[in-house]
């Protein structure tokens, strides 16, 4: 009985996710915590699921699927993230991506602190808990972690002893795509995790090795992307059932700030370029999907290649869906995968330029979903709405 109730709830949640779209975009505003930035006036105000940015006499509004104001707790954030985790257990490929300028709270949201754990530790705990409730299915989980830096992939769980701690022993991994279009990272360590304690032990290890390999932890997090993958193997109890595999990515992206502003030179400049390239490649993938082009430029960066499974399947289905009436009306348009983007912004006046750029990026991501919302409308209406959105985005991009 319990199982069927739980399954009903999960089914309902998945439906809600489907209706709301495969890419959901949330925004979290960082509180005025200790910093050397001055608090002059507050350029950002939150009005339910909308953010209003007031700067230099202009006023702009940005809509989100959910907005977390400064006072939102880690718990409140996780409650909204949970449905996507349930989708992962149901066999979907999912990804949760933290996006934003350095210092806006991406790592706080994903990792959190000992007192105030973030999305990853909460998700790990919840995965094991939820799996234990689904008695008709047996689950096996494994964890992999990698860092993308200057276009190179470093395996954060392939460790060798180094002095009193560990160092990464495998760098420059290659990405492979199999005949089904599924993405694999060659030689990436995959550790089976049988309970939450083991999972968080490996996760902490991966995070630590990432930090200790850098002279400055903040620099590391602003210059590289950190990806955690949970692979979920599920086996139903029906006779002859086959093991299904799904991937659950949790991504803490490098800082989204623009290169020009940092005044970087030499190596730092290359690093900045690599980050900007992969972030703009992510934006291009989203834009490509939104415009329903045949070609989606995944190959432009390692980051988008890796996430292709999770971002791509959804989007490809959406693309097919939007050009094929029967798929368009089918409930399963979103069955491949789901993505959640958590856009982080600073509450400070001096960051308002970056904030506007982050919102523009978010708008691109949400536009994919808008196509879906409009699927019942006529083609003409859809096109008009898309060109309106494109116009709005062009205006915002010009200001960046
Ligand atoms: P990012 O990863 O985006 O560069 P961090 O997560 O490192 O930013 O956040 C920068 C600082 O602000 C950290 O000291 C972090 O603990 C703090 N911080 C960020 N968001 C919050 C929040 N919602 N509540 C309390 N402190 C926060
Ligand atoms: Mg960080």
Image: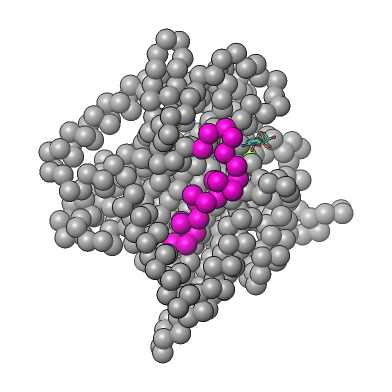
Q: Residue at x 57, y 73 (%)?
A: 132
Image quarter of residue 284: top left
Q: Residue at x 42, y 64 (%)?
A: 10
Against 18, is 103 above or below?
Answer: above
Q: Nearer the viewer, residue 272 or 353?
A: 353
Q: Is residue 38 left or right of residue 259?
A: right
- Front residue of this view, candidates 106 and 277: 106
Across and down, in percent, residue 85 comes to 49, 59
Q: Is residue 32 rendered magenta in the image?
A: no
Q: Residue furthest right?
A: 164
Q: How many marks?
A: 0
Q: Is residue 85 magenta?
A: yes
Quadrant location of the N terminus?
Answer: bottom left
Q: Is residue 204 visible?
A: yes
**Residue at (48%, 66%) from the top-left corner?**
89
- Predominant SS along the magenta part: helix
In the depicted structure, whether residue 84 falls above or below residue 379: below
Quadrant for ligand 1 reads: top right
Q: Which residues are magenta?
A: 68-87
- Is residue 243 visible from the viewing direction of this image? no
Q: Position of residue 180 (x, y in %)?
A: 36, 66
Give the residue furthest to the bottom: 239
Q: Residue at x 60, y 20 (%)?
A: 263
Image position, residue 6 (x, y; %): 46, 69
Q: Observer-nearest residue: 300 or 345?
A: 345
Q: Position of residue 164 (x, y in %)?
A: 87, 54
**Which image quarter is the C terminus in?**
top left
């Amino acid at each position: 009985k319990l199982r069927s109730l739980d399954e009903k709830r999960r089914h309902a949640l998945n439906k809600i996710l489907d209706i709301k779209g495969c890419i959901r975009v949330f925004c979290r505003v960082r509180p005025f915590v200790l910093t050397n930035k001055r608090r002059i006036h507050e350029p950002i105000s939150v009005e339910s699921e909308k953010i209003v940015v007031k700067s230099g006499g202009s006023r702009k509004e940005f809509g989100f699927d959910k907005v977390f104001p400064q006072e939102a707790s880690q718990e409140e954030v996780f409650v909204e993230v949970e449905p996507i985790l349930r989708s992962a257990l149901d066999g979907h490929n999912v990804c949760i991506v933290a996006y934003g300028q350095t210092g806006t709270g991406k790592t706080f949201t994903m990792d959190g602190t000992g007192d105030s754990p973030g999305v990853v530790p909460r998700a790990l705990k919840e995965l094991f808990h939820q799996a234990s409730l689904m008695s008709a299915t047996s689950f096996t989980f494994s964890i992999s972690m990698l860092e993308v830096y200057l276009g190179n992939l470093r395996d954060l769980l392939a460790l060798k002893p180094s002095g009193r701690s560990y160092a990464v022993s495998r760098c420059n991994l290659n990405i492979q795509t199999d005949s089904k279009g599924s993405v694999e990272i060659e030689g990436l360590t995959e550790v089976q995790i049988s309970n939450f304690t083991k999972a968080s032990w490996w996760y902490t290890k991966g995070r630590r090795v990432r930090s200790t390999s850098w002279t400055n932890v903040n620099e590391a997090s602003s210059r590289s992307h950190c990806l955690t993958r949970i692979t979920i193997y599920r086996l139903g109890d029906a006779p002859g059932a086959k093991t299904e595999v799904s991937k659950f990515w949790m991504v803490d992206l490098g800082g989204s700030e623009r290169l020009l502003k940092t005044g970087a030179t030499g190596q730092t400049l290359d690093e900045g370029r690599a980050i900007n390239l992969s972030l703009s490649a992510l934006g291009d993938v989203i834009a490509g999907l939104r415009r329903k082009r045949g070609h989606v430029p995944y190959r432009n960066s390692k980051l988008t290649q890796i996430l292709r499974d999770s971002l791509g399947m959804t989007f490809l289905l959406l693309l097919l869906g939007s050009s094929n009436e029967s798929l368009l009306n089918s409930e399963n348009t979103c069955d491949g995968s789901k993505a959640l983007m958590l856009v982080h912004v600073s509450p400070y006046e001096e960051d308002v330029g970056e904030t506007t750029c982050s919102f523009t990026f978010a708008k691109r991501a949400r536009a994919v979903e808008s196509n879906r919302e409009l699927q019942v409308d006529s083609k003409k209406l859809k096109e008009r709405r898309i060109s309106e959105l494109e116009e709005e985005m062009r205006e915002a991009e010009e200001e960046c």
